[in-house]
Image (tube, rainbow, N blue to C red):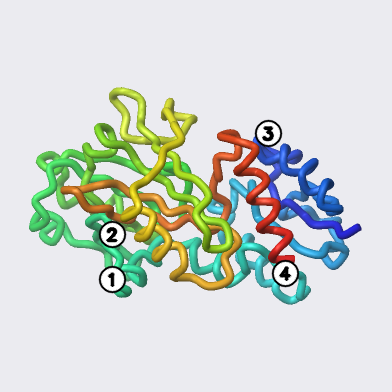
Amino acid sequence: MKTIALLTCERLPDLNPADQALISLFAEQNIRAVPVIWKAADVRWTDFAALVVRNTWDYYKEADAFRQWLDAMDRTGVPMFNPVQVVKDNMHKFYLKRFQEKGVTIIPTLFSSATAPVKWETLQTQGWDKIVIKPAISAGSFLTQTYEARTLTPEALQEAVAQDDWLIQPYLPEITTEGELSMIFFNGTFSHAVLKKPQEGDFRVQRQYGGVYQRVDPTPELLALGRRIATLENHLLYARVDGVMLDGKFHLMELELIEPDLYFEFGEDIRRRFVTSVVEKI
């Protein structure tokens, strides 16, 4: 029987409950799936036939350590899904530039780097009434702040982006009214989609902030676009395409390739498709 590691974090040593349900399904395929904390010091990684990144939901708080660990995993030669280089590239949200260059429509974004921070004058030319500033390395709205353009001074902007890399974007009321759409693909094939809306008075769709989720069926046009975006990177086990409709057109917010919630709780059919996809990779 092959053994694989389902990678997680210290906060969830036994995995998120929705991911725990995968273990018995892997057993049906004669595969032993073991939750393993990614930064545990006493793990012999070469004992595993594959590493599957699932609930490493603290990586963005320890980005340097996570990169070093990824390099160490690469040296072991043990297959990782998604692959090490894909995970490293996806950690920093400036990857959106690369997809934009490939013809993908992303939500309006100014990329502010530590060495070339966005200037107040540049921001003013955008005509945005409300502004969202988020770290380039983050998850779950970590350190994301909103500002009213009319009250944001040059000094306040400079302070907000003085260190590190940041994404500056307009606040999108469509997220509240239309919701954020996530389309999930396993091995390049569409699995399911979920529409997420924030609770009243908030802009964050994550469950910890009161977000409400429902399973939906995207249009054929949206699915075709989602598939094109999800296959821009190679050798992916899973991809979650997150976006919002603006003026009738899908705009990419993020392509989640590291440790996204894949919404396994929405059906055993989803969990079985994921397990089958892992078996195909192995």
Quick check: 87 above or below 16? below
Q: Secondary structure at mark 1?
A: loop
Amino acid carrying label 4: it is: Pro
Q: Residue at x 22, y 62 (%)?
A: 118
Q: What residue is pinned by disc 2?
A: 106
Residue 79 tag number? 4
N-term mark: 3 or 2: 3
What is the three-letter code of the residue carrying label 1?
Answer: Gly
The answer to whether the residues at label 1 and label 3 have Cβ atoms under 8 Å apart is no
| Front residue of this view, candidates 53 and 217 | 217
* Residue located beneath label 3 in the image: 17
At x 27% / y 45%, what residue is drawn? 132
Marks 4/3: CA–CA distance: 25 Å
Q: Tags 4 and 3 in contact by the CB under 8 Å rule?
A: no
From mark 3 to mark 2, how far is it between C-alphas?
32 Å
Furthest residue in direction front, as rendered: 220
Residue 5 position within the rendered picture, expressed as x and y whole percent measured from the top left: 77, 55
Local SS, label 3? helix
N-terminal label among 4 and 3: 3
Q: Earlier in the sequence, mark 1 or mark 3?
A: 3
Q: Which comes sooner in the sequence, label 2 or label 4?
A: 4
Q: CA distance from mark 2 to mark 4?
A: 31 Å
Alpha-carbon distance for marks 1 and 2? 9 Å
Q: CA distance from mark 1 to mark 4?
A: 31 Å
Neighbour tally class for label 3: few under 14, some 14-19, many 20 plus, Cα within 10 Å: few
Q: Is residue 4 left or right of residue 213?
A: right
Q: Are marks 1 and 4 in contact (CB under 8 Å)?
A: no
Q: Which residue occupies 12% across, 42% down?
A: 129
Q: Point out which mark residue 125 bears.
A: none
- List x then y, in percent, for residue 281: 69, 66
List the residue tagged with mark 1: 103
